[in-house]
Amino acid sequence: MSNRSQQVREVQLADIWSVGEGHTADGLPFVCRWRTPVLSPLHVDGYDRVLKVVWPYADANTGAMPTADDSQTMGVFEDRLVQAWEHDGHAYLAAILTLDGARQWVFYTSDIQECARRLTDMPQEQEPYPLELTTEPDPTWSWLHEQILRPFDLATGSPD
């Protein structure tokens, strides 16, 4: 982990989260959790790819929020995924957005192949998880700042 940001690891280990709830401009309810403090581009070396993990639990364009059973199942999955990807600082869970029939976990890492291996190796249920994974370069964490936090006017205070 020598070429990875110490600030990322410190925020990760502190494990402090903020929560925002509300409605989009279209009137759809959302819940967003994000790690605080939110790191600026100066503090994110070694975590240059955004990895979005999406679990659709209802039809899109319905505004559906998860049932209690959906939430419990996704909570077990999240705990397993965080353990698999974060225990050694390999990946960093920056935010979780629940909106319109899907939950999206926003991770940052530098090694997508290792994330895939760890996902495959982690405990599973009898049925495969209904996941959609996408990744792209994002060395300044603009996806987190521009697509998750800013549209919902969520607090984005950064350390100096």
Image (cartoon, rainbow, N blue to C red):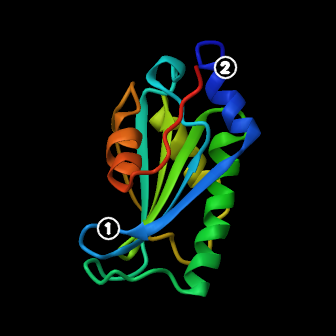
Is residue 116 toward the left or the right of residue 79 in the image? left
User: Quick one: SS at disc 1?
Assistant: loop
Separation of residues labelled 1 and 2 (CA atoms): 35 Å
Quadrant where the image shows the C terminus: top right
Mark seen at residue 6: 2
Q: Position of residue 111 (x, y in %)?
A: 49, 31
- At label 2, counting other C-alpha atoms closer than 10 Å, the crowd grade (few under 14, some 14-19, many 20 or more) is some
The residue at the point 39 percent across, 51 percent down is: 153
Nearer-the-camera pick, 71 or 117? 71
Mark number displayed over residue 24:
1
Give the camera-side residue of 97 and 134.
97
* Above or below: residue 52 compared with residue 12: below
User: Can see residue 30?
Assistant: yes
Element on which disc 2 rests = helix
Disc 2 residue type?
Gln
Query: Alpha-carbon neighbours of circle 1 within 10 Å: few (<14), some, or many (≥20)?
Result: some
Residue 95 vertical placement versus 130 (above, below): above
In-image side of 158 versus 54 (left or right)? right
x then y, percent, for residue 36: 61, 41
